[in-house]
Image (spheres, coloured by chain):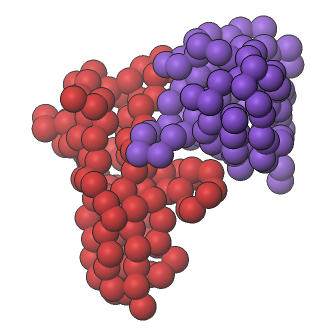
Amino acid sequence: NAGVTQTPKFQVLKTGQSMTLQCAQDMNHEYMSWYRQDPGMGLRLIHYSVGAGITDQGEVPNGYNVSRSTTEDFPLRLLSAAPSQTSVYFCASSISLAGELFFGEGSRLTVL
Amino acid sequence: RKEVEQDPGPFNVPEGATVAFNCTYSNSASQSFFWYRQDCRKEPKLLMSVYSSGNEDGRFTAQLNRASQYISLLIRDSKLSDSATYLCVVKEGGFKTIFGAGTRLFVKA
């Protein structure tokens, strides 16, 4: 049972570089989202999607882009990495707005 | 005031102890409530939903007090394997989900 798969698990970037964090789910969930987790803070929502072709901003969207061309995939793009984007990123999916969130294993990003 | 606040940790308890975690939320219109568990360097996983009538799952009991905007989690007969961070999660409607910062629990032999 794959569930939610994130890649890469670890990444080091230099300031100004761009990259894409990949997220795929095989549960046919309509709802997908990206969170970042920083020490001493709760997970914060970056972007979310309620279905293929539909995305919206969360609490901390600046510096990130998303797209949702298929139900399965929801990549997160960092446009020009900054040290403030050093964090652990989690992708999640759910079957409904009120339903359980299923998380990927996380991607640890360091921006130098 | 934070939207969701949890007890500061860490909690250090011996095996077999009963431990209680508390959480308060600021939005009285919040709709649903959960406790998630997060092991060190792992992803959060749902522990249990929290219902107004209170609910129990084995050694775990969750309570919700809407009037006081307060959620609790009680763990009885703590096991070493309960050592983790416990996240209080509040859904306000739509896609807005607020995570508490978490409370770390260490259960000692």
Q: Is residue A7 left or right of residue A38?
A: right
Query: Which image quadrant is residue A87 in?
Result: top right
Chain A, colour shown: purple
Examine the rendered structure and indicate whether residue A103 appears above or below residue B3: below
Examine the rendered structure and indicate whether residue B83 appears above or below residue B5: below
Q: Residue most toward the bottom? A: B109
Examine the rendered structure and indicate whether residue A22 appears above or below residue A68: below
Query: Which image quadrant is residue A75 in?
Result: top right
Q: Is residue A89 left or right of residue B108?
A: right
Residue A96 spot, x, y in % from top left: 60, 28
Chain B, colour shown: red
Q: Residue most toward the left? A: B68
Please give the name of the residue rendered at 81% of the width and 21% of the height, measured from the top-left corner: A18
Residue B9 spot, x, y in % from top left: 31, 60
Residue B77 spot, x, y in % from top left: 35, 81
Please give the name of the residue rendered at 48% of the width and 65% of the height, measured from the top-left corner: B84
Residue B49 spot, x, y in % from top left: 43, 47
Q: Quadrant of the N terminus of chain B?
A: top left
> Foreground: B100 or A13?
A13
Residue A88: in sight, yes or no? Answer: yes
Q: Is residue A41 left or right of residue A17?
A: left
